[in-house]
Amino acid sequence: MKYTGNSNFSHKQQSKIGVLLTNLGTPSAATKKALRVYLKEFLSDPRVVEVPRLIWWFVLNLVILNIRPKRSASTYQKIWTERGSPLQFHSKDQADKIRTQLQQHYGQNIVVEYAMRYGQPAISDVINKMMSQGVNKLLVLPLYPQYSGATGGSTFDAIADNFIKRRFLPEFRFINHYHDYSPYIDAVAQKIKRYWSQNGRADKLIFSYHGIPKRYLLNGDPYHCECYKTSRLIAQKLNLKSNDYLTTFQSRFGREEWLKPYTDHTLKALPGQGVKSVQIVCPGFSSDCLETIEEIRIENRDYFIKAGGEKYQYIEALNSDKLHIEALVKLVHQNLTGWDVNYNDTGLRAKLATRAGAKA
């Protein structure tokens, strides 16, 4: 194997620490063509769909990719903005604000970037870019508060794929979850409180998380438990009683059983149980995206109202809110412990390289 390196590398290059934020990804445009490219990459990941590869190849390429891109493009068009995909610009805004705060503290020796697991900017491309700038210590923060193999695990796979082809490996740290991190819990709770102060409260508060197949839970994935813990901790901050809130799971795909209770089924049933108003928040999503804007704010609202509900409200994701950025910056600070960000070994490396050249 030919290992990759930096052809412009210099031993005089200043050493830096890198912080890489990652999220799931988004198509480059709300078109059938762009969705086909995006969905093929996304659904080809064995972490996302754990089905025998040969069988899945035929299902994906002969069925799904001939049907779903057009339908998905139509859905994305409902949420597309002048800045493009909400997930894309929220991720950029988060990285920009986190970079500003970290550089105010550490100076220019810290490099902060964001990347997408599927689509652009790709994780491998961004790692290459960061290392070309002198990054030799890399901290990766996937913006999934709750760990799942399909999200955090898949992100690690993409990083490992880059590393096994690389000549020089940076020191590496990986934050695999922060579902019970107090500043994050506080940020969600405060967002809900601010919403209540402006809009009042509903009969029921629903915490909706992205679903995964139940089979993953039974095989040891901690996602289900971490979602419930997040809900419980936020509820405690809000002084909620057990019957004041629910935890549900959305975004099913395929025919097998996924984590229950399902968000859509719950919303269809609640009016018949006397619940006439609901507010929904999605603590598993660090940024608003297709699953929160279209699926939760629009599609699931229709289910609730048609079933007899009277008032349905969606509380936005944390996005680049001040408390969210502060929470993530604190999380990064903690995980940089032991790495001297201001340490610069440029002179030593250059001197050693000169000695090695003279001996040769």
Image (cartoon, grey):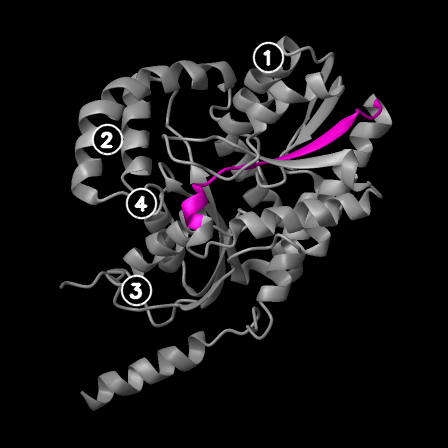
| Mark 2 residue type | Leu
| Mark 3 residue type | Phe
Secondary structure under the numbered disc 3 in the rendered image: loop
As displayed, is residue 249 above or below residue 290? below
- Kindly identify which residue carries mark 4: 50
Marks 2,1: beta carbons within 8 A: no
Say if residue 323 shows up in the picture.
no
| Mark 1 residue type | Asp
Marks 3,4: beta carbons within 8 A: no
Comparing labels 3 and 1, the label whose residue is closer to the camera? 1
Sequence-first tag of 2 and 4: 4
Which residue is pictured at 37% across the width and 27% down the height? Answer: 28
Marks 2,4: beta carbons within 8 A: no
- Kindly identify which residue carries mark 3: 9
Q: Nearer the viewer, residue 307 or 93?
A: 307
Q: Residues within 10 Å of mark 2 (few under 14, many from 20)?
A: some
Instruction: Please identify the quarter of the rendering in which residue 94 is found.
Output: top right
Q: Nearer the viewer, residue 47 or 348?
A: 47
- Kindly identify which residue carries mark 2: 60
